[in-house]
Image: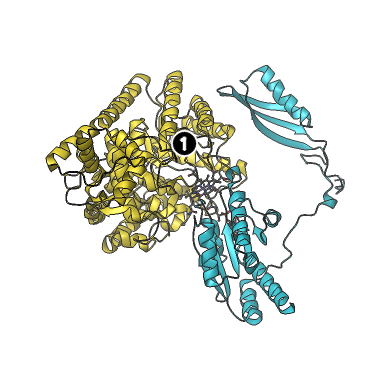
Chain colours: A cyan, B yellow
Amino acid sequence: MSKVDLTQVRPYGDTLNDGIVQLSLTLPLPLSAEAQEAARRWALQSGFQDPKVVHSQDLGEGFSFFVLYARSPVAVDFSSIKVLKSSHKTLEKAEIEALISSKLGRKLVVVGASIESDAHTVGIDAIMNIKGYNGHKGLESYHQIEAYNLGAQVACEDLLARALDVGADAILISQVVTQKDLHLRNLTRMVELLELEGVRNNFLLIVGGPRINYELAKELGFDAGFGPGTFAEDVASFMIEQVLINRKGDHDV
Amino acid sequence: MTRPYLANKLQLDPVLIAEARTIANDIVAQVTPFIFSHSTVSVERTIVRMFGVNGVNPEGIPFPNVLVDHMREQGLIEDGAASLIAKACLHYGKNPQSLAEEIDRNELSLENLPDYPLETLHEMALGLALPAVTRIKEQGRNREAMIGSLGQGAEPYLYAIVATGNIYEDIIQARAAVHQGADIIAVIRSTGQSLLDYVPYGPTTEGFGGTFATQANFSIMRQALDEVGQEVGRYIRLTNYCSGLCMPEIAAMGALERLDVMLNDSMYGIIFRDINMQRTFIDQYFSRLINGFAGIVINTGEDNYLTTADAMEAAHTVLASDLINEQFAFLSGLPEAQQGLGHAMEINPDQPDAFLYEIAQAQLIREVFPRSPIKYMPPTKYMTGNIFRAHVQDTLFNVASIMTGQSIHLLGMLTEASHTPLMQDRFLSIESAQLVFQYMRNFGDEITFAADGKIQQRARETLQAAVNMLITIRDTGLFGALEKGMFAEISRSASGGRGLDGVFAKGPNYLNPFVELFGGDANV
Ligand code: B12
């Protein structure tokens, strides 16, 4: 096999650089030979080469469904891609516990919730509840962490009030419903609230959910974001690292 | 599938099943006196709605809220809205709608109305209730007539969801789904509607992960489904969600607009939306009274319990809850034929033989509830963004559904882990279900299970565990069981959650004419 040129990466079917992709789509047209041709031209005009409509079907009500295979001439320069990632090192639970007790000298306090209209708790529970997720224990099981899981549909104001009340080091937020970018609105609301109250820098502000990543979280003004497959130790490692850095910062001032 | 389901493939002990029902009945009987002696603001708003009060004031507040809030502010609510409105109608000689509008403009008050004999108020209230009752009856007859002339799909009914947020776009999606083969269209509600203590008004075109339930939206979708039903020659059922803080109001709207199926669980809101349990138990009683009278099939929410708990460990909680829901339904006079008990036991597909256990659980629910149009939920929790694998998972559930004689088949979507269904997702799902159902139509009839094999054993264990759980619930009481987190591993306190401030004890002269009109318990 020839070697992949990392400055020019294309989709792979069965031959390097064949550029093969699979597409499926609906057009607001009843099925006809013309509609099929419309699907093919759509692919051509989207920049695909040699599109083949391998399946087409009428969906009723003036819609039809198409499956296409096509080749893409587009290549991306993989060598120049940089994705913003958290640079923290993920530690084991025992290491985290040891680090908190030796370096912080008190418990790490964490408040978490699924905010506003979002009723999904499984994500935040996976991170916070004792039981954890896939055999990885949650934050409540950490002796060195004082964790408060407020559940779902918690108003930003209530979450903040609780965080202030218990003197939290970190606020953890889960957002699962992303339809019509609802999560962006809710998350922005939280950041604005913290800024308005002048307490943004009092907390590490962390978000997680199936459509969340670090880069998006940073853009929204959070300190970090965690996506699918996250375990408690991932976020705990980040929190203790940041709290220690910030504390060092405080001393320097 | 024709009901009742007569096969006894699991060799379940009928005595144990009967015992389970007796215990569930005891559990419901423990909370019944509380339900009968209390009412809620949403029950009262429902009465107001069924007296013909509709619309919103200039600030957009629905008139039923205006009226009931006024009654509360004046400290009059314990007599019930029906009594107060009857009195005001007699005194002012006005209809309920005008009363609401004038009260809103502070031109009129319900304070200091003269006393009338209870009998007079009762009669007046029955008169005010009559138009709604007549309309609901008529809608029931319309449904019967349309099913009679058009016919309907065969069970398992294909149940498809639309959720664009825009009722007009929902119609396009629904019509296409019906042409593709859907029998039931469920318009999913917008995120957060269940926490609103009022029902939004008018047609709506913006929602998140769903479309607002409003009476106008019900009516618009009803008309569209009647039309497309004529085109395809089958009666198409319409579903919405009568849950949350406005549960009975939505039931009333659904009954008036001829919905056919309503999500209406006795505990779902408590567990999954943190709605106060006292509020919920009272609201669900009246909602089910309405649904029962209107000939609406209810669906219960056990199909979601195992999203938060593990299906291998907690399958019995689904059965136990179904049995409790059944008894709550009987309390409201809802017959088995209208009890679409929900279930789903989605087991981690990594578990060896997961499919055998899926079959065991689905068959168990079928055999314990042979007359009910039980509702089967496809996989959700273990679906991932790998849509191709997800399609296979759904296909296996289609097999389980047809094999075990399910009645209402919620269509699984290959895109479950990413978004609410696109038109093509729904199409692929309907196509797959139809393929499997046709391939395997009578497969179940040809299958028996190995005596004392994995399937029979698993089913019997689940039944026994459900009975044990019911015994514990009877000992602690249902409130206590919910506090302990016995369902879905979510714990709720009797005085916590939303909506408790809307609960009140009925006064000695409390009146609700609909209870007797809908055949409710004479003690209410
Ligand atoms: C279970 C479930 C429910 C349950 C929730 C029960 C509960 N108490 O949580 C119920 C049935 C109540 C429910 C309701 C609804 N749901 Co739902 N639900 C799901 C389902 C099937 C699984 C979600 C889940 O539990 N995943 C497992 C967890 C562990 O994964 P996770 O959340 O991604 O969490 C991990 C990471 O993201 C991360 N993480 C998450 N949060 C956090 C937080 C922090 C701080 C950190 C560090 C990490 C982190 O770590 C976790 C572990 O690795 C998904 C479909 C799917 N398969 O994904 C739909 C889904 C999420 N639901 C959806 C919708 C639309 C709804 C409703 C709005 C439907 C409606 N109209 O009524 C309602 C919501 C009502 C509301 N007010 O929010 C859509 C969302 C679409 C979208 N993109 O917006 C989905 C995708 C289904 C679909 N295709 O329509 N749902």
Q: What residue type is labelled 1?
A: Val
Can you name the residue that lies furthest to the front here? B107
- A136 lies above or below B52: below
Judged left or right of residue B22, residue A4 is: right
Residue at position x 58%, y 59% in the image: A173
Residue A128 visible in the snapshot: yes
Seen at 55% across and 69% down, the residue is A164
Please tell me how crowded label 1 is: few (under 14), some (14-19), or many (20+) other residues with Cα within 10 Å.
many
Above or below residue A17? Residue A38 is above
Give x and y (percent) for residue B291. 31, 38
Give the x, y percent position of residue B330.
25, 44
Left or right placement of residue B60 versus residue A169 in this view:
left
Say whether residue B468 is visible.
Answer: no
Side of B275 where A23 appears, left or right: right
Q: Mark 1 points at which residue?
A: B187
* Tag 1 secondary structure: strand
x and y percent of residue B321 in the render?
34, 52
Left or right, A236 with respect to A43, comes to left
Question: For the residue with label 1, is its CB less than 8 Å from the closest atom of ligand 1?
Answer: no
Q: Mark 1 lies on which chain?
A: B
Q: How many marks?
A: 1
Residue B80, placed above or below residue A34: below
Relative depth, front residue between A140 and B224: B224
Quarter the N terminus of chain B occupies:
top left
